[in-house]
Amino acid sequence: MMEEDKIKSENPLKVNRRHFFSQLSVGIGSLALGSLLIPDLFKNSAGQIAQPTLGIPHFAPKAKRVIYLFQAGAPSQFETFDYKPILRERMGQDLPESIRKGQRLTNMTANQDKFPLMPPKVGFQQHGESRTWISDFFPHIAKIADEITVVRSMHTEAINHDPAITFFQTGSQISGRPSMGSWLSYGLGSENKNLPSFVVLTSRGKGNSQGLYSKLWSSGFLDSKHQGVLLRSGKDPVLYLNDPEGISRSDKRHLLDQVSSLNKLHHVETGDDEIESRIAQYEMAYRMQMSVPDVMDVSKEPESIIKLYGEDCQVPGTYAANALQARRLAENGVRFIQLYHQGWDQHGNLHDEMEGQAKDVDQASAALVMDLKQRGMLEDTLVIWGGEFGRGNYCQGKFDPNNYGRDHHPRAFSIWMAGGGIKPGLNYGQTDEFGYNVVENPVHINDFHATLMHTLGLDHEQLTYKYQGRRFRLTDVAGNVIKDLLA
Amino acid sequence: MVMNDSAPRDTFVLNRGEYDQPTDTVYAGTPASIYDFPDGLHKNRLGLAKWVTDTKNPLTARVFVNRIWGMVFGRGLVETAEDFGVQGSLPTHPELLDWLAVDFMEHDWDIKYLLRKIMLSATYQQSSELTPELKIADSENKLLARAPRFRMSGEMIRDYILASSGLLNREIGGPSVKPYQPAGLWEETNAGGNRGTLTKYIPDEGDKLYRRSLYTFWKRTLPPASMTIFDAPTRDFCEVRRQKTNTPLQALALQNDVQVLEAARVLSQQIVAEKDSPKDMVNDVFKSILVRSPSIDELELLESYYSNAWEEFNQNKENAEKLIAQGSYLQNESDPVKTAALMLTAQVIYNLDETITKE
């Protein structure tokens, strides 16, 4: 190696053929072999934190990674975490104008002349020492009431799904900004070399769904290496991951060695270092072909884990399977793991649909938190559960207690968080007695982003990217860290 | 889309942006700082078009010429091709930009003329070799002392692979087509149930699979993966300058996308049918894809690679049969072992940096 370095330093571009072949066989071949024999070779050890390329972290991080359990379609706060007995007392009566204050509505209810209050059909109990109100749809989450913090005072500006979910994911209602996961990848870099730092997993319940869009995990104006990689259930978890039939692993190795040899020759000719980078990317692709199926393969999980997440976790493509997958990805150093569960848009048939949606996610969401805890990972993994806005406290359409629905509502809704530097067992923020407006400790989406970044050691005002003449941030020109939420 | 100018609607400044709180009425106009709107023009779309293309407008020709330059050289004379304002960068060669812009207008805004002018220049026809001296003096090549070297766009890469294998369908115009795409992508993210034509991706058949990427059907909420992996914009918003990243997903796409595998297979079948010796076959594949003859070293490496692959497939003919089954394009009678070995050789070449790079 020393001789090689000498030749290189004398003339970095005139590497002779013999020399480069020897470098090749020792270099790339042994690298690949090494990573095959020792799968942990590229995995991060505890002490390794991303190099502070942007002066980062700005302060000591509590969380190293995020698992975001996004409930797409917006679950109603009135059937999940915001218990309002007055809705039963005043069932069917009109929502007082003093509460609604002429608020802008979607065109689904804007023409209603009555807004009859509608209580949840599902029961509510208080749980844990925190006495957290949780509906009976979520018996498993109820059991971890003291591990989670419920925020009941979330609010947003968007009233329709696309802008609302885009706002949550990118800090702007208009598409084109980088997703949160991309910002974190940009700010914190990768914790591993075999997997992308930002991955996305999707599942769909039987409830009324809204589509998902790849812009939600786009890197916007940031370098596209920060974009989320959609991991799919089935045999091709990453697009184009599998070799065609008829090619063995050793065939593939030979093919790549050949590509590398020829690329190296061309590198010597052109002097363009981009070619070296391409060779490195081909090696990473080769490693991903091994590491991704390995991470996705839950067959080696013990019976106790299967029981914890529920039988569904063995069915690829379910929320439970994705939740278990999320833990495995977190263990393997993925920075931001974004789950979406579709089907929470209950404009009608709310009780039955929500019951089904809750069944999909309740056990596995709680299991994930407990599983992380028993592995000692909850303290540096931030778990978030929630949708893009709330639902109205009145009935959409004709009043019918047996089959009711709720329209979109941006002014107040509930989410929960756990682990990663967030105070456990806290009930944060309050809505008025009708659950319509926030009356205490409001948390805007910008505040939520600022707080999330804070747990990861990032100052939301300092992590910027200059684009089209100005510095952009995830929180743009707003956002305050909610200190009371921090452990 | 049908647009109608006959009855322009009134437009207002909205109080704090609230759509139900209109205040002052506003009227159409153009920024006076660029170039005053001539009195004789009507303030409608025709007037705007005339204002934009007036030879006195200082921006239009410069911006356009710069974009063409950027496509050809990988970077515009003004690097921020989307922004000629105060936040944009200054031109590296202002006189050249001005001259090209005027020349372009004097030749009746003829794009072919402009392209020819640029491409026949001594600057464009230089070698892209990066000597140690140049690397020190001008690593970013702002001074253009060498030809550019940059990765082609996703569309260009796909078209290039189709063209070099002889598969490209050069038909012009007509409705969009649906080439190969990994199964299930649309189904996994749509809203469930039957939502019309965008619910399920059903690839086209026959000739439509080989049309230029320009004609590829584009679902904006989930654009074609083989394009976005190579930094094609999502088309949610305007993106003048594309990124040119280098990622493992690109490596996987070039290795395993059926569009590439099929091209390698079809090209190999043609050559196996025509040539006998491994040397000739390898030489032909190389020339078809890279449009140059291989060096002695390259030929030696590829020939021995081909022979090894041939040995391997000869031991396991079933694998050869499986491999050459890629794609729906008509199979020919060529020897499967030879075809499979040559197909892998073609795959090696399709995966070279040089192949997907303009140099």
Image (cartoon, coloured by chain):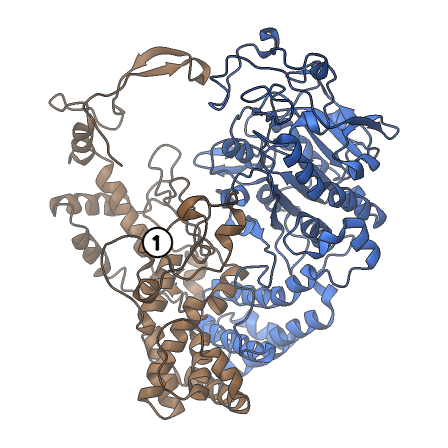
Can you say which quadrant of the picture contains the C terminus of chain A? top right
Residue at the extreme right: A129
Q: Quadrant of residue A138?
A: top right
Query: Can residue A457 be seen in the rendering of this structure?
Result: no
Residue B129 position, x and y percent, is: 38, 67
Residue in the picture at 51% in, 51% down: B187
Q: Nearer the viewer, residue B223 or A88?
A: A88
Q: What is the chain letter for disc 1? A: B
Can you say which quadrant of the picture contains the N terminus of chain A? bottom right
Residue A119 position, x and y percent, is: 68, 20
Task: Answer few, some or many: residues within 10 Å of disc 1's Cα (few below 14, many 20 plus, some between 14 and 19).
Answer: few
Q: Quadrant of residue B345?
A: bottom left
Q: Which residue is mark 1?
A: B143
Residue in the picture at 37% in, 40% down: B238
Residue B267 position, x and y percent, is: 36, 77
Chain painted blue: A
**Left or right, residue B90 beside residue B35:** right
Q: Quadrant of residue A458?
A: top right
Say what amino acid the circle numbered 1 marks.
Leu
Q: Colour of chain B?
A: brown
Q: Nearer the viewer, residue A73 or B38?
A: A73
Which SS class for mark 1? loop
**Left or right, residue A33 beside residue B178:** right
**Left or right, residue A452 beside residue A133:** left
Q: Is residue A284 above or below residue A256?
A: above
Query: Can residue A387 be seen in the rendering of this structure?
Result: yes
Residue B283 position, x and y percent, is: 36, 84
Residue in the picture at 33% in, 76% down: B288
